[in-house]
Amino acid sequence: MSRRVPSQPNGMRRNRYSPPSGPSYSVYARFRNGRIALARHFASLATAAAFLDRARADRFHDPDGLYLVDDHSGADVSPAMVTALLRAAVTESCAVPRHAHPGHQLLP
């Protein structure tokens, strides 16, 4: 008995290693003369940048050897863009809400 794999709407089969149809980003580490995938197919660039930041914090050997790649173009995402995204995420998480719940008090 052979297992049938359902086909995609366009008639092409998609294996589990092919990137999703929308934009996606992967985190790689430089290793010897190549690269190793640490995490693949993040749908959001901000999520991929946050994962990259956490992975760099945990990596004691060559944290700059980790980088982001746009899955569709195959191009590296510039470190300046990653830094800007991380700064924006920190700014958003530290922002004071416009309105607070009546039972809560905002600290001065």
Image (spheres, rainbow, N blue to C red):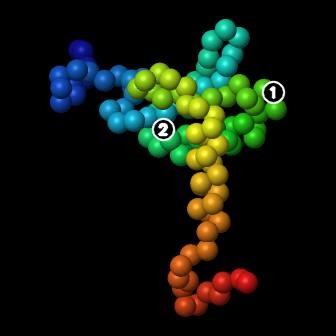
Residue 83 is situated, as x and y percent measured from the top left of the image, at 64, 43
Q: Tag 1, which secondary structure? A: loop
Residue drawn at 67 percent across, 19 percent down: 30
Q: From the image, tell me which residue sits under label 1.
A: 61
Residue lying furthest right = 60
Quadrant of the rendering where the C terminus is positioned: bottom right
Residue drawn at 62 percent across, 17 percent down: 35
How far is the residue under mark 1 from the one under mark 2?
Answer: 24 Å
Residue 90 is situated, as x and y percent measured from the top left of the image, at 64, 57
Q: Residues within 10 Å of mark 2 (few under 14, many from 20)?
A: many
- Along the line of sight, the residue nearer the viewer: 42 or 80: 80
- The amino acid at mark 1 is His
Residue lying furthest front = 80
Residue lying furthest bottom = 102
For residue 42, the mark is: 2
Quadrant of the rendering where the N terminus is positioned: top left
Residue drawn at 24 percent across, 15 percent down: 2
Residue drawn at 61 percent across, 20 percent down: 36
Residue 75 is situated, as x and y percent measured from the top left of the image, at 50, 23
Residue 102 is situated, as x and y percent measured from the top left of the image, at 55, 91
- The amino acid at mark 2 is Phe
Q: Is residue 26 above or below residue 101?
A: above
Residue lying furthest top = 33
For residue 19, the mark is: none
Q: Earlier in the sequence, mark 1 or mark 2?
A: 2
Asked if marks 1 and 2 touch (Cβ < 8 Å), the reply is: no
Q: Is residue 36 left or right of residue 4?
A: right
Q: Is residue 108 left or right of residue 76?
A: right
Q: Tag 2, which secondary structure? A: strand
**Residue 40 visible in the current orientation:** no
**Residue 78 visible in the current orientation:** yes
Q: Is residue 46 left or right of residue 13?
A: right
